[in-house]
Structure formats: structure tokens, C-alpha cells
């Protein structure tokens, strides 16, 4: 597996409309897209620095991964995503190293990226996402 860089930092927010202006207008990072990823129960609002993105994550309901996270921990950094050259190969290599990957196959995330998450138990407490560009 080859890590190509930090793709984005995922930040759990209660309300995109309330929190986006900081990223968009105060830091002045260019807005890239806003997209509902239905099977993850999340609305993503993405800003691109040109060298790594910021992805704001708002739950579509309380009974979703981000909804539960917000209930338990409140808003803040949720995960760090690294771009990989080949996600299928990465999953295979991680499993061979007994790293706890949250699914056997990648799912399609925001912007059509193929993604997989690694359990924080295997990473020292950080939810890590791997993503392969479509
Ligand atoms: Co992400």
C-alpha cells in the first residue's frame, strides 16, 4: 500500500450552516461540494486547501454514525483520511497485519472515492479513513 497524502480531515458538526462560515469566510478555503452520502447517513460539506481538504460532517439523523458520535462526544475532529493508490490492496495488507478494518470491501464515499475505515483500537485512538480517487 502506498499513502499518497492526507486527503481530508473529517469534522463532526451539529449544523453545517452554523459552522461552515468559519472555514469558508474566515479561513477563506475554497468550497468544493456539498453532498449527502445516504448510506453513511451524513451530509458532507467539503473545502479544499489545495493540499488536503476539510470535510464537515452533519448527521442526517440521530441514529447514524455521526449522530451517535455527536451524542457521545460532541462536535470536533472525527477522522483523518489518507489517500491510497489501491484500496483493495490496502485492505488486504491491513488484514494480514491484524489491523481492524471496519469492512472487507471499500464503500463509495463523498466525491465517488472508494473508502474504508480503520478502527481506532488499531491506530492509537484515531479513526483513520483510507480513500482511493475515483
Ligand atoms: Co472522510
Image: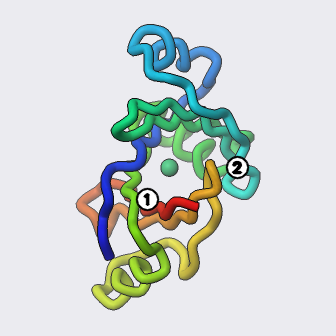
Relative depth, front residue between 92 and 134 = 134
Look at 42% across and 44% down and name the residue there: 8
Q: Is residue 60 above or below residue 119?
A: above
Name the element at disc 1. Answer: strand
Figure colour scheme: rainbow
Q: Residue furthest top?
A: 26
Given contact means CB atoms under 8 Å apart, are the residues at marks 1 and 2 in contact? no
Q: Is residue 46 above or below residue 81?
A: above
Look at 62% across and 42% down and name the residue there: 67
Whether the residue under disc 1 has CB within 8 Å of ligand 1: yes
Q: Is residue 54 above or below residue 6?
A: above
Q: Residues within 10 Å of mark 2 (few under 14, many from 20)?
A: some
In-image side of 35 versus 134 (left or right): right
User: Disc number at residue 129?
Assistant: 1
Q: Is residue 48 above or below residue 5?
A: above
Q: Quadrant of the C terminus?
A: bottom right
Q: Position of residue 27 (x, y in %)?
A: 39, 14
Where is residue 96, by image quadrant?
A: bottom left
Q: Position of residue 84 (x, y in %)?
A: 39, 65
Look at 64% across and 62% down and name the residue there: 108
Whether the residue under disc 2 has CB within 8 Å of ligand 1: no
Label 1 – label 2 distance at C-alpha: 15 Å
Name the element at disc 2. Answer: strand
Q: Earlier in the sequence, mark 1 or mark 2?
A: 2
In-image side of 69 versus 90 (left or right): right
- Identify the residue position indicated by label 2 in the image: 37
User: Disc number at residue 57?
Assistant: none
Q: Position of residue 110 (x, y in %)?
A: 62, 49
Q: Position of residue 100 (x, y in %)?
A: 39, 76
Q: Quadrant of the N terminus?
A: bottom left
Amino acid at each position: 500500500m502506498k499513502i499518497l497524502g492526507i486527503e481530508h480531515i473529517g469534522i463532526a458538526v451539529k449544523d453545517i450552516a452554523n459552522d461552515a462560515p468559519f472555514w469558508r469566510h474566515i479561513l477563506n478555503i475554497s468550497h468544493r461540494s456539498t453532498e449527502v452520502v445516504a448510506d453513511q447517513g451524513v451530509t458532507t460539506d467539503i473545502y479544499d486547501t489545495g493540499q488536503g481538504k476539510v470535510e464537515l460532517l452533519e448527521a442526517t439523523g440521530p441514529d447514524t454514525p455521526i449522530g451517535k458520535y455527536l451524542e457521545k462526544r460532541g462536535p470536533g475532529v472525527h477522522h483523518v483520511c489518507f489517500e491510497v493508490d489501491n484500496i483493495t490492496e490496502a485492505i488486504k495488507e491491513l488484514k494480514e497485519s491484524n489491523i481492524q478494518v471496519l469492512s472487507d470491501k471499500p464503500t463509495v464515499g463523498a466525491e465517488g472515492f472508494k473508502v474504508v475505515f480503520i478502527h481506532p483500537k488499531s491506530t492509537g485512538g484515531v479513526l483513520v479513513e483510507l480513500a482511493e480517487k475515483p
